[in-house]
Amino acid sequence: MSKFRTRIRDVGRAIGGFGFAAIARKERPRYMLVMAEAATAAEATQAEVAGVDAILYTGPLADLPQVVKASRIPVGAQLTAATHDDATRAKEAGADFITFDDGRTHAAALTVRDMGHVLILGADQDEQRLRSVAAVELDAVLVEAESDVITVREQIELRRVAILTGAPLLVRAAGTPNAGHLEGWRDAGAPVVLVPAAIAESTLRAAAEVPAPRKPSSNEGGAVIGAPFASRHDHDHDDEDDD
């Protein structure tokens, strides 16, 4: 099991983030994880100090070992058009997971063992395609979302993607999300938000304000929108967690 997947499974159970700022605040458990997008080692360090839960490194693969070595949190590598050799290099550098475009990535790239996989989902969200994605063992599905007013329809569409793919969503936020945006995404099946390292600290403050998911009362049945991702990962054994 990747460390990133473990973080998703345990969201809300432990203090989020491992940066110095997070330790100093001794904050209550967060119910929304924050991943920072970093193109350089300096950006990755800045985000980790702020207290993010994971880093997605988007810079040159040759610099990935430096980023991983300096980090105490899961680091993923963006390999949009990954080959088997790319995935192998990322693993050898210590990457916990990779993000990939299924239309450009070689199938052999996903055969590299002991790595997490996050599929980048584009505009094609046809039901048949989403159901076919469910056949791939994924840590998450990466989707784009505007940091604007979230309508019920948009929330339902996100939940549809999560249910049909059988994976939690990682939302790449366009703009600076507030607590309301994060709560809406979380309730639609997206327990993780991806933001640039430059706004990681403000996003963490917003994430700390997101309340625990509301549990339906006995007469509400299952109608309340909530996270549809929990059951998929509960089958993983604890002894497969962090080394």
Image (cartoon, helix red, strand yellow):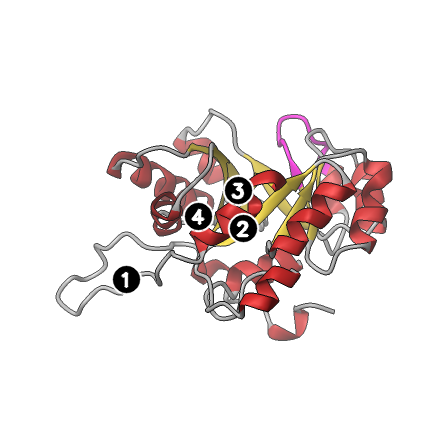
**Is 106 or 37 nearer to us in this picture?**
37
Q: Earlier in the sequence, mark 2 or mark 4?
A: 2
Instruction: Tell me, for residue 30, which label it has, or none.
Output: none
Rendering coords of residue 36 (x, y %): 61, 44
C-alpha distance separating marks 2 and 4: 11 Å
Q: What residue appears at the point 39 percent right and 50 percent down from the top-left corner?
A: 186
Disc 1 marks which residue?
214
* Above or below for 157 versus 72: above
Q: Is residue 213 left or right of residue 198?
A: left
Residue range of the region highlighted in magenta in the rendering: 99-107
Q: Which of marks 2 and 1 is nearer the N terminus?
A: 2
Q: Nearer the viewer, mark 2 or mark 1?
A: 2
Q: What residue appears at the point 59 percent right and 57 percent down from the top-left corner?
A: 5
Q: What residue appears at the point 46 percent right and 69 percent down from the top-left corner?
A: 28
Disc 2 marks which residue?
34
Q: Residues within 10 Å of mark 3 (few under 14, many from 20)?
A: many
C-alpha distance separating marks 4 and 3: 9 Å
Q: Name the magenta segment's main secondary structure.
A: loop
Disc 4 marks which residue?
190
Residue type highlighted by circle 4: Ala
Q: Which of marks 1 and 3 is nearer the N terminus?
A: 3
Q: What residue appears at the point 58 percent right and 48 percent down from the top-left corner?
A: 35
Residue type highlighted by circle 2: Val
Disc 3 marks which residue?
141
Q: Which of marks 4 and 3 is nearer the N terminus?
A: 3
